[in-house]
């Protein structure tokens, strides 16, 4: 369970916080003095500190500065009386996570502590580069050996140490947050703050307030000054997820910040300077949005100091098998399923052929569900979720297109004109790669039929390595029996 350090000379407050945080499964370490608090940080590993400003002998601000010396990434949540709000605001400007006024609003306390713990996780859990293997990692991992992922790793290495903005592009679930964290952790700002903001999860007004803060009285309900993420994260890195969902008004303010590293809080006229690095991510077509007038062209070019494009899982070949192994090991460890030996070849074949519309995030969920459904040491096809297994009811001996818009399931692969006509009718957006994949699938199947499934001879005829033959057999779901065939929905 995560731990919170509560620093307050009032034992009643500490007990109240302990009782409240137990509801969200957070343990607490109690400290009544500044010295006890600093010792607890040195000897323990709290994920968040709740710090009273008015401590005996010493000011909470002085304690905060000492905490920053010990661990600059440890979130500190100030507890203060309303008369000391100016001191708390000063602490926020120095990098504190947030503050709460007494008497404590316990539901809000729980919410802020949860956010602080998640923030700590984002900063502290390492992102390993690259990949694969049976040994469980102590942090998050990029798993993959495909050429596409190796290019992603190289791009992270090239840009991490440079003070330029980065735009991460890719479908939902491909791992854009992992890329952002890897850039941060390998950058000169790695000892400073890292904060993530989901632009799609907040309304225009809330997002503007979250990023830039607001002055007291700026709008109804603004009963105190609020420090925004750009001010709070001075010297650090901000990850703007789903940046394509940002309103035009907020886009303009972010553009100015990128150009001048200065801004004003909502409802204020005081110019505030800051120094933040922005990493943005989106799954939307920003170029089309620029043409449509819904995204500012100048902001697009400012954010796009360097682009890192994450491939969808369906295009990563044998990475799928590596990811299945990685997440299965991880799930077995977390669930204590020591009896599980692995996954059957039939079940793995179905996972290799599945299209993965939800990408890596979906694969992780499928592996966990399969483990929960399994009653034997080996995960078999019947253990797979219905969304996956329902697509593999039979194994016909002819190619069958996986696209439901194709009317002829027995389309001869050699009839290229018919295939192209059907894909055009289906209004495909990826005809080039679909056609190349279809031609390669047909060629490989045809040659393997000719050689009776002899991969060595097929490699000689095709002029490629046997390893590449094996990769394509797995990727296309080719069944090597007396007659070489492609499984239904092979991909």
Image (cartoon, grey):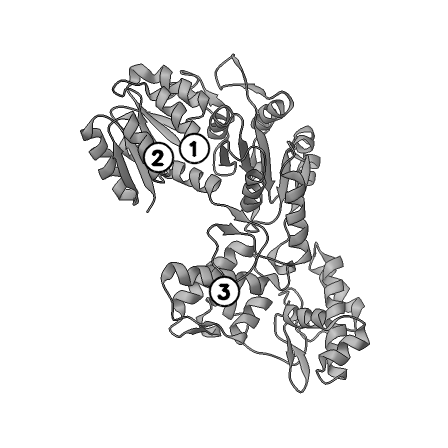
Marks 2 and 3, how far apart at CA: 47 Å
Please give the name of the residue rendered at 47% of the width and 63% of the height, measured from the top-left corner: 328
Residue most extreme to the top: 269
Please give the name of the residue rendered at 50% of the width and 50% of the height, measured from the top-left corner: 140
Dot 1 falls on a residue whose secondary structure is loop
Dot 3 falls on a residue whose secondary structure is helix
Q: Are marks 2 and 3 in contact (CB under 8 Å)?
A: no
Dot 2 falls on a residue whose secondary structure is helix
Q: Position of residue 73 (x, y in %)?
A: 45, 33
Please give the name of the residue rendered at 60% of the width and 49% of the height, measured from the top-left corner: 171
Mark 1 lies on residue: 71
Mark 2 lies on residue: 41
Q: Are marks 1 and 2 in contact (CB under 8 Å)?
A: yes
**Residue 382: quadrant of the picture:** bottom left
Residue 387 has which mark? 3
For marks 1 and 3, the one nearer the N-term is: 1
């Amino acid at each position: 369970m995560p731990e919170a350090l509560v620093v307050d000379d009032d034992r009643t407050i500490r007990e109240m916080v302990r009782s409240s945080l137990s509801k969200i499964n957070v343990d607490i370490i109690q400290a009544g003095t500044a010295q006890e608090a600093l010792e607890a940080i040195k000897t323990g590993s709290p994920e968040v500190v709740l710090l009273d400003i008015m401590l005996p002998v010493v000011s909470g601000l002085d304690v905060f500065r000492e905490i920053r010396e010990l661990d600059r990434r440890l979130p500190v949540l100030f507890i203060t009386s309303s008369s000391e709000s100016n001191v708390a605001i000063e602490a926020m400007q120095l990098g504190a996570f947030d503050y709460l006024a007494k008497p404590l609003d316990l539901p809000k306390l729980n919410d802020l502590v949860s956010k602080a713990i998640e923030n700590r996780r984002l900063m502290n859990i390492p992102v390993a580069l690259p990949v694969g293997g049976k040994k469980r990692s102590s942090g998050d991992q990029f798993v993959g050996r495909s050429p596409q992922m190796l290019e992603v790793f190289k791009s992270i290495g090239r840009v991490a140490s440079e003070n330029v903005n980065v735009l991460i592009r890719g479908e939902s679930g491909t791992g854009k947050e992992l890329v952002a964290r890897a850039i941060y952790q390998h950058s000169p700002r790695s000892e400073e703050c890292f904060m993530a903001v989901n632009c799609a999860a907040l309304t225009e007004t809330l997002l503007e307030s979250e990023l830039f803060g607001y002055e007291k009285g700026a709008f109804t309900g603004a009963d105190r000054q609020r420090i925004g993420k750009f001010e709070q994260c001075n010297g650090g890195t901000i990850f703007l997820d789903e940046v394509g969902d940002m309103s035009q008004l907020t886009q303009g303010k972010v553009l100015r910040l990128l150009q001048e590293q200065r801004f004003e809080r909502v409802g204020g006229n005081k110019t505030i300077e800051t120094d933040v690095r922005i990493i943005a991510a989106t799954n939307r077509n920003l170029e089309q949005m620029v043409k449509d007038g819904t995204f500012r062209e100048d902001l697009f070019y400012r954010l796009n100091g360097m682009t890192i494009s994450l491939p969808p899982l369906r295009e990563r070949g044998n990475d799928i098998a590596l990811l299945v192994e990685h997440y299965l090991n991880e799930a077995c460890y977390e669930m204590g399923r020591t009896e599980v030996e692995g996954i059957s070849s039939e079940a793995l074949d179905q996972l290799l052929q599945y299209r993965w519309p939800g990408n890596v995030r979906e694969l992780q969920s499928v592996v966990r569900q399969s483990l929960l459904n399994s009653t034997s040491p080996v995960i078999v096809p019947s253990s797979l979720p219905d969304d996956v297994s329902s697509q593999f009811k039979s194994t016909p001996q002819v190619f069958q297109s996986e696209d439901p818009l194709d009317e002829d399931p027995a389309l001869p692969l050699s009839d290229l004109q018919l295939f192209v006509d059907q894909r055009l009718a289906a209004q495909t957006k990826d005809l080039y790669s679909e056609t190349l994949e279809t031609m390669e699938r047909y060629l490989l199947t045809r040659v393997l039929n000719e050689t009776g499934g002899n991969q060595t001879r097929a490699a000689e005829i095709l002029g490629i390595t046997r390893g590449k033959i094996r990769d394509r057999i797995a990727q296309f779901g080719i069944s090597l029996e007396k007659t070489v065939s492609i499984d239904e929905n092979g991909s």
